[in-house]
Image (cartoon, rainbow, N blue to C red):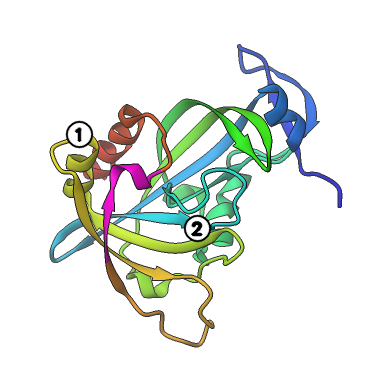
């Protein structure tokens, strides 16, 4: 099976060419990604949604992450990448429904499948206030292990270090579409999240408060 291709960029964000995914991460080429954070208002206050990455993911398996996100494939624009929300969460979304939170420069290193990787991304970040319950989402089982929500103020406290754990509710993927997903309660700690920079997380969370 042929590899997904990514456009790569120089330090001035000028396109340099198109390279297979494995080479992008092996050599640390700069590429683009799309992040969408979803929040909703409830009688208990505003909540933020996280996805749990599948255990089969090559990077950060089983950790909690952005509500929906993905790399831009070769030739794609940020507007095209909004497809990630529907693919991962089963919710159709238009770009004009999202609020831009600007961009984040992301850098991470590690190993995946026994190979070292260098991940350098320019992330186009968006927020979306969508007042749907968890049970309305239909998760992409190959990518998403579950979808969770927690109080936005609690999440901010967690990342600021004033709380060590927070309460969250979630649903598992893999249930038949005609079944009502069962919501369960859990407790989350900072160590269970993908290790993006705390300041980047907090910047997004505080913007979500203002939506």
Q: Is residue 187 magenta?
A: yes
Q: Is residue 105 magenta?
A: no
Residue name at image x 37 percent, y 29 percent = 197
Residue 5's disc number: none
Upstream in the sequence, badge 1 or badge 2? 2
Residue name at image x 28 percent, y 34 percent = 202
Which of the two residues, 133 or 140, is positioned nearer the viewer here?
A: 140
Residue labelled with disc 2: 93
Q: Is residue 179 above or below residue 67?
A: below
> Which percent across, then down, holds residue 184?
30, 73
Side (left or right) of 206 relative to 36: left
Q: Nearer the viewer, mark 1 or mark 2?
A: 1
Residue numbers of the magenta segment:
186-193
- Marks 1 and 2, how far apart in space? 31 Å
Side (left or right) of 113 relative to 178: right
> Which percent across, then down, holds residue 77?
64, 38
Residue name at image x 86 percent, y 52 percent = 1
> Which percent across, then down, holds residue 30?
64, 23
Side (left or right) of 15 relative to 56: right
The residue carrying pointer 2 sits among few (fewer than 14), some (14 to 19) or many (20 or more) residues within 10 Å by Cα, namely some
Residue name at image x 57 percent, y 43 percent = 59
Q: Is residue 174 above or below residue 6?
A: below
Which of the two residues, 5 or 159, is positioned nearer the viewer here?
A: 159
The residue carrying pointer 1 sits among few (fewer than 14), some (14 to 19) or many (20 or more) residues within 10 Å by Cα, namely some
> Which percent across, then down, holds residue 173?
49, 70
SS assignment at label 1 = helix
Residue labelled with disc 1: 160
Side (left or right) of 186 relative to 70: left
């Amino acid at each position: 099976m042929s590899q997904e291709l990514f456009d790569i960029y120089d330090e001035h964000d000028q396109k340099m060419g198109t390279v297979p995914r494995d080479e992008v991460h092996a050599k640390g080429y700069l590429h683009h990604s799309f992040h969408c954070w979803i929040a909703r208002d409830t009688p208990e206050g505003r909540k933020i949604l996280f996805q749990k990455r599948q255990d089969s993911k090559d990077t950060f398996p089983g950790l909690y992450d952005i509500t929906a996100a993905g790399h831009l494939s070769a030739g794609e624009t940020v507007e095209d990448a909004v497809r990630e929300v529907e693919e991962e969460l089963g919710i159709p979304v238009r770009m004009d429904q999202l609020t831009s939170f600007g961009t984040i420069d992301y850098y991470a290193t590690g190993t995946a499948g026994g190979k070292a990787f260098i991940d350098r991304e320019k992330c186009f970040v968006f927020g979306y206030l969508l007042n749907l319950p968890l049970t309305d989402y239909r998760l992409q089982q190959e990518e998403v292990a579950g979808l969770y929500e927690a109080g936005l103020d609690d999440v901010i406290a967690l990342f600021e270090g004033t709380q060590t754990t927070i309460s969250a509710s979630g649903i598992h993927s893999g249930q038949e579409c005609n079944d009502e997903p069962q919501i369960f309660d859990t407790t989350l700690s900072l160590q269970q999240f993908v290790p993006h920079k705390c300041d980047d997380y907090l910047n997004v969370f505080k913007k979500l408060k203002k939506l």
